[in-house]
Image: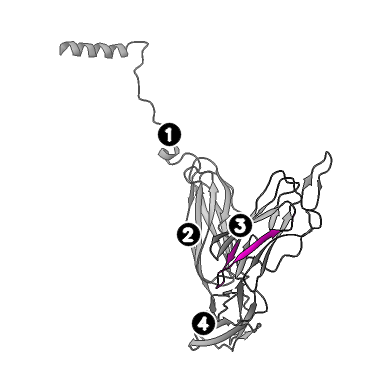
Amino acid sequence: MKTLTLIALTLTGALAAPGLEAASPAPAATTAASTGGGGPRIQFADLVHDFGRIDAGTVAKHDFIFTNAGTATLEITEVKPGCGCTTAGTWDKRVEPGQTGRIPLQFNSTGFSGTIAKGATVTCNDLSQSNVYLTIKGTIWRPIEVTPQSAYFNIPEESPTNATRVVRIVNNLDAPLTLSEPECTNRAFRAELKTIQPGKEFELHLSVQPPFDASRPQATVTLKTSLTNTPVLTIPAYAYVQPAISVVPSQVMLPAGPLTAAVQPGVTIRNSGTNDLTLSDASINLEGASVALKEVQPGRVFTLSVSVPAGLQLPSGQRVMASVKSNHPRHPLIQVPVFQSARTVTSATTPVTRPAQPVQPRLPALQPPPMLARPPEPITK
């Protein structure tokens, strides 16, 4: 024990001897996370703003206030709203430590009703939170609420039915509401008004009645009201007659010619009709090319593959069609036009673009069912 004590004293004296310094612990690393103040730091007074109840058509505005609680300049690089109805004004892009800035947001309530919540993403150079999400919300109030604001119908070509769509009309005012009988601009549509609660709630029943004079019939239904500030309600109605046979894509587009390699584009033929479909005698009026027909799902889904050899270029002025016969009485012959992209020739001076050959003919009547695009919101006069 005495020996160990003597050794310890000797080492202590050696460390304290002249020319030698006693080792000290390394200083702790200083980071923004440990101190909470290093670098720029963004702090918002509020991340969510509730407008409460606002009238439809109102442009609601709010300034989000933030503070730079850090030790370096805070830079706001982007404010990106989530949709087109919400926009950002000119915001403070550089804020020094301890200073405040603002980000103005505004929401256009036109076309909206009921409860809404919209937002915007703020991007900055705060490493602890480089993206901050701001939210504005509220309730859009209308004196007369129409739900839905448009009526849509999707009708099979072979078995059109008298499908009905119901539009609810609710009066949010204290005074009772009176509505006239509906007027419709297209006789293919029928409109009937029913009273659910006198003066307060109504239902507009819309239906379509074949035959139709177009594949996409549409109409505008109007109702006169007893309100001076909303004298007329306008409700659009849209219908789409789904073809029994659809071809996707509706045409074949070949690369610019002459082809450097053989290509084999294909199309899908789908039967949505009542009876099974039979296809036969696939052909193409292009020398050197061929087509192959395959039944993927019996009576329902087929593929038509077009084989075009290398070196081929469509003859100028020739209308090229891939065709197949059908047992469907309305579509005895299914044709798919074949086109070729333009070829760009680059010279030492000016690039010259040759037009595509042949000139595109009028597309056949048979087209695949497109997606129904949402029409503009109805106008309430």
| Residue at image point 74% right, 45% down | 311
Tag 2 residue: 48
In the displayed structure, does residue 29 sit left or right of residue 133? Answer: left
Tag 3 residue: 89
Q: From what the image shows, is residue 155 above or below residue 101?
A: below
Q: Position of residue 253 (x, y in %)?
A: 70, 54
Q: Quick one: SS at disc 3?
A: loop
Tag 4 residue: 173
Label 3 near label 4: C-beta < 8 Å? no
The amino acid type, in three-letter code, at marker 1 is Thr
Nearest to N terminus: mark 3 or mark 2: 2
| Residue at image point 34% right, 17% down | 22
Nearest to N terminus: mark 1 or mark 3: 1
Q: Quick one: SS at disc 2?
A: strand
Q: CA distance from mark 1 to mark 3?
A: 37 Å
Q: From what the image shows, is residue 145 above or below residue 294?
A: below
The amino acid type, in three-letter code, at marker 4 is Leu
- Asked if residue 127 can be seen in this view, the reply is yes
User: Where does the magenta region start and end?
Assistant: 269-286
In the displayed structure, does residue 2 sit left or right of residue 33? Answer: left
Q: CA distance from mark 1 to mark 4?
A: 63 Å
Tag 1 residue: 30
| Residue at image point 49% right, 61% down | 49
